[in-house]
Amino acid sequence: MNKVLHALVYLILAVSGVALFFELNLFDKKALLADRNRQLEDYLVRISHTLEKADATKPATLPEAKKDISPVEAKEVEVPETENVLEDYPVHLEEANLETLKWDDKERIQMRQMYKLDGEGKKIPDPANPGDFVKKGPGTAAELLDVLFDRAKAQQAKLNVTRAELVASRSKLEALVADYNKLKPPARADKILIEELKAKIAQLESDKANLEEQVKKLKGQIEDLNAEVTSLKDEVTQAKEETETVKEDLAKAQKLVEQLNKLLQQRPTSSSSNAAITSLSAGNKGKIIDANNTYMFAIVEFDDASIKELLGEERQNPLPLLELGIRRKGANGDVYVGRIRLRQAVAGKNLIVADILGDWQQLPAEKDDVVFAE
């Protein structure tokens, strides 16, 4: 009996030693599991501070960036056709600094709750798994992890949408850059044309000054001729008063007078140049009844008042070579067409032939275009 007791005591001592060994090893494992669980809690809390609590709400009104899509033509467009390039733009993706989950000690405590508890704080058996307990539901760690997973998945979906929108925005930007680059060559060509036109205008101004100088010289020559004519007339009067003995000299003087009379008939009289007007009162003066844009002339029908203003009450004055404007009635108001210069009046009618000035022409002249003075 004593031997049995001794054997049993030794056996209990051996089992106790083994139990002590396992206890020491399990204590280290327990500390490891506690540290690992604490580290996991810390990182889950830190991750919760980076995940948005909810998605940004979509605004009621979308942003607008209207692009002018009307064609570029040689006419004014008061209300161009446009399209909104931001029509499908998800502006809610720009919302920054959204509220995050921001877990704290309350969630730390819940993450330590593996099972769902009833009202008495006891674990609830899982009907689907006999012998096990319910691990999901309010108050469990699974509830928080599901929230964390759902928000991470939503944030990933938002990131993918943002990437797709970046691709779409880049495509729109490339299209806008291409449209902008298409405008540069015509703009450069227009600038070159403008510089050429400026040079041409400067040359025309110089030619005009030269012509004015020539006109001034011709006027001086006419005055000299008038003085010479006056002198010759005096000589003729003196010759007529001479006696019959100077008939030969008188005949020569008469010949000279005939030549001078021919010169006087050929030159413009001072009364005609003085009668020509230099401008018209502002307003509509008539309309074009026919136009030839190839040979650059038009036939204009003036109203009675304008004809009297141009030629006088009895049409006794010469036609002044005035420049007048042309405009056309359009859907959005009057459109400027160009300018004409009066050249020849038709006798007995209100018709005047005019030259179409190419330097001023914006559009081809047409029948029924309005002629006006500024």
Image: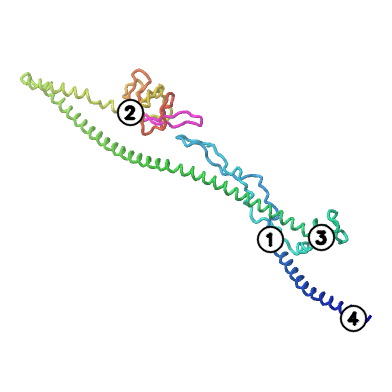
Q: CA distance from mark 3 to mark 2?
A: 107 Å
Kindly identify the residue that appears in the image at 49 percent across and 44 percent down.
Answer: 178
The C terminus: image quadrant: top left
| Helix, strand or loop under label 3 | loop
Give yes or no for residue 329 being in the magenta stretch. Answer: yes
The residue carrying mark 2 is: 321
Name the quadrant containing residue 309.
top left
Q: Is residue 300 above or below residue 159?
A: above
| Helix, strand or loop under label 4 | helix
2 or 4: tag closer to the N-terminus: 4
Frontmost of labels 3 and 1 is 3
**In this picture, which residue range is highlighted in magenta?**
323-342
The residue carrying mark 1 is: 47
The residue carrying mark 4 is: 6
| Helix, strand or loop under label 1 | helix
At label 4, the amino acid type is: His
- In x, y percent, where is residue 197? 35, 39
Q: Which mark is residue 275?
A: none
The N terminus: image quadrant: bottom right
At label 3, the amino acid type is: Tyr
